[in-house]
Image: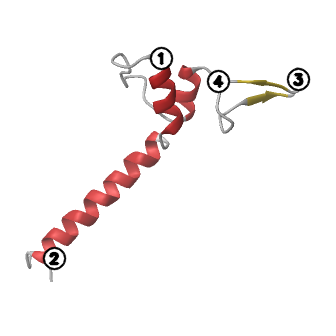
Amino acid sequence: MAKDSVVIQDEQRDNNLYFPSKPMMAKLMGIPKEFDFSTTSQTIESECIGQSIEYPMHDAIIKKLKEHLLFAHARLNNRLF
């Protein structure tokens, strides 16, 4: 694993470190169960989950970006003010 990989420290078992499973990583990142990784290998799936931003945060950013673009478009076309 890479040096910046997520690990879980188990304080009840001599502080052993464990790598989370792909389902656990997906759950921690807020990725819905319906999200389909069937077209990728296990390695690519793990990399996609690990390098992504949290799913709910992504959703909020995209909604705000869309809102901003619609506002700018309306303003440029003199439909606002």
Q: In which quadrant of the rendered image does the C terminus lie? A: bottom left
Question: In 3D space, how far apart are the residues under numbered discs 4 and 2 (Cα atoms)?
Answer: 47 Å
Per the image, label 1 sits on a secondary structure element best described as helix
- The amino acid beneath tag 4 is Pro
Q: Which mark is residue 42?
A: 1
Label 3 sits on residue: 12
C-alpha separation, residue under disc 4 versus residue under disc 1: 14 Å
At mark 2, the secondary structure is helix
Q: Disc 4, disc 2: CB below 8 Å?
A: no
Dots 3 and 1: beta carbons under 8 Å?
Answer: no
Residue 79 left/right relative to 3 = left
Mark 4 or mark 2: which is in front? 4
Q: Is residue 56 above or below residue 41?
A: below
Q: CA distance from mark 3 to mark 1?
A: 30 Å
**Residue 38 is drawn in which quadrant?**
top left
| Label 2: how many Cα within 10 Å (few below 14, some 14–19, many 20+) | few
Q: Tell which tag, 2 or 1, sits nearer the viewer.
A: 1
Q: Are marks 3 and 4 in contact (CB under 8 Å)?
A: no
Relative to residue 38, is residue 56 depicted above or below?
below
The circle on residue 20 is: 4
Task: Please tell me how crowded label 1 is: few (under 14), some (14-19), or many (20+) other residues with Cα within 10 Å.
Answer: few
Dot in front, 4 or 1: 1
Q: Amino acid at mark 2?
A: Arg
Q: Disc 1 residue type?
A: Gln
x, y percent for residue 14: 91, 23
In what element is the residue under mark 3?
A: loop
Q: Please tell me which residue is depicted at 38% across the width and 21% down the height of the picture.
A: 37
Q: Are marks 2 and 1 in contact (CB under 8 Å)?
A: no
Q: Could you tell me the amino acid type at mark 3?
A: Gln
Label whose residue precedes the other's in the sequence (3 or 4): 3
Label 4 or label 1, whichever comes before in sequence order: 4
Q: Earlier in the sequence, mark 2 or mark 3?
A: 3
